[in-house]
Amino acid sequence: MAGCLEDKVVVVTGAGRGIGREIALLAAREGAKVVVNDLGADLEGEGKDEGPAFDVVREIEAAGGEAIANTASVAEPGPAEGIVKAAVDKWGRVDSVINNAGILRDRIFHKMSVHDFETVIKVHLLGSFYTSRAAAQFFREQGSGTFVHFTSTSGLVGNFGQSNYAAAKLGIVGLSKSIALDMARFGVRSNCVSPFAWSRLIGSIPAETEAERARVERIKAMGPEKIAPLAVFLASDISEDVTGQIFACRMNEVFLMGQSRPLRGMQRGEGWTPQTLASHMLPAMKPSFYPLDRSGDIFSWDPV
């Protein structure tokens, strides 16, 4: 039986290790020709190592699949455009871009440097834009294409010490929804995945309290291979009715995440003043305020 990506050309960024590697391997098993992109940098985006990308290509080829390696950075527009161009130059088309590449530079906010903030934004948010924009022209011409962007509950819910990462990941949600709206007329779809899985990035998060250490142990049980099926599904034609959505994936659980909508509304015929907002609006709406939750507060049960 043919795979769900048979004869498709798929670009996977950050595909040398972890979640990206598992996505690239599964995409190839499902029949795709794969561009395995990975700069081979360390967790903070420094350095370069071509080994991981080429290792994944060799693994795909050994299993009878077809793939090429690309070691460009997604954080600059020219190299990012070259990632997509590599697919078109090799196979004449591109059918899906899976924006998985990422780094972490966690700092508590009052110690967050401008450089650390901008660097994370460039890799995650701008990188997703650069590769997506490069593919958009080809998708428009061929009347089809899919984007799968990786977001995080760090942005959707919240986490300590990740203002740069959270801002980038929530920005990706806005980017994905805008792409879905703007390109629906061309048969192009765009969705987000928020993964829970053990990876180099997760392994770098400090665990100082007993509760944090216990949470890390739970995450270690969640392998990156559990995320790949959802990403491949969204990249394929069997998800043809799905666009503009946000999914979370945790072990064997899949969640459809909410999007911002009004919770409560009030009107005052004579208009508002700061004082009436305090006396009238605040008591009515305060019970519906969101607490300062972290991701672990919302997903507090053991993974299934």
Image (cartoon, rainbow, N blue to C red):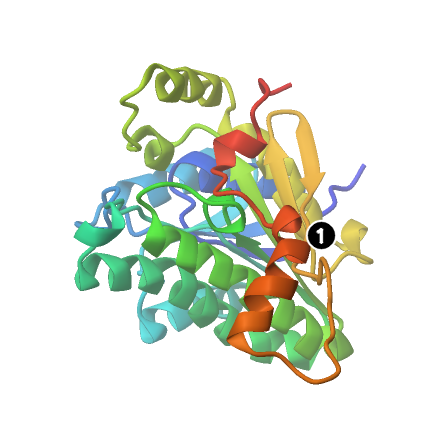
Q: Residue at x 31, y 55 (%)?
A: 71
Left/right of residue 109 with respect to residue 2 in the rendered view = left
In percent of width and height, residue 162 lies at 34, 47
Identify the amino acid type marked 1. Ser
User: With respect to residue 48, does 17 lie above or below?
Assistant: above
User: With respect to residue 102, does 75 lie above or below?
Assistant: below
Pick the residue in front: 247 or 90: 247
Pick the residue in front: 187 or 272: 272
The quarter of the picture where residue 175 lies is bottom right
Task: Work out whether residue 248 can be spotted.
Answer: yes
- The residue that disc 1 covers is 236
In percent of width and height, residue 298 lies at 57, 33
Q: Point out the image quarter for the C terminus.
A: top right
Task: Work out whether residue 8 can be spotted.
Answer: no
The quarter of the picture where residue 301 lies is top right
Left/right of residue 268 with respect to residue 200 in the rendered view = right
The quarter of the picture where residue 283 lies is bottom right
Q: Residue at x 77, y 79 (%)?
A: 185
Q: Point out the image quarter for the N terminus.
A: top right
Q: Residues within 10 Å of mark 1 (few under 14, many from 20)?
A: many
Pick the residue in front: 286 or 79: 286
In percent of width and height, residue 157 lies at 52, 45
Dot 1: element: loop
Q: Residue at x 78, y 52 (%)?
A: 239
In percent of width and height, residue 273 lies at 56, 78
User: With respect to residue 50, does 304 lie above or below?
Assistant: above
User: With respect to residue 185, does 122 lie above or below?
Assistant: above
Left/right of residue 71 with respect to residue 180 in the rendered view = left
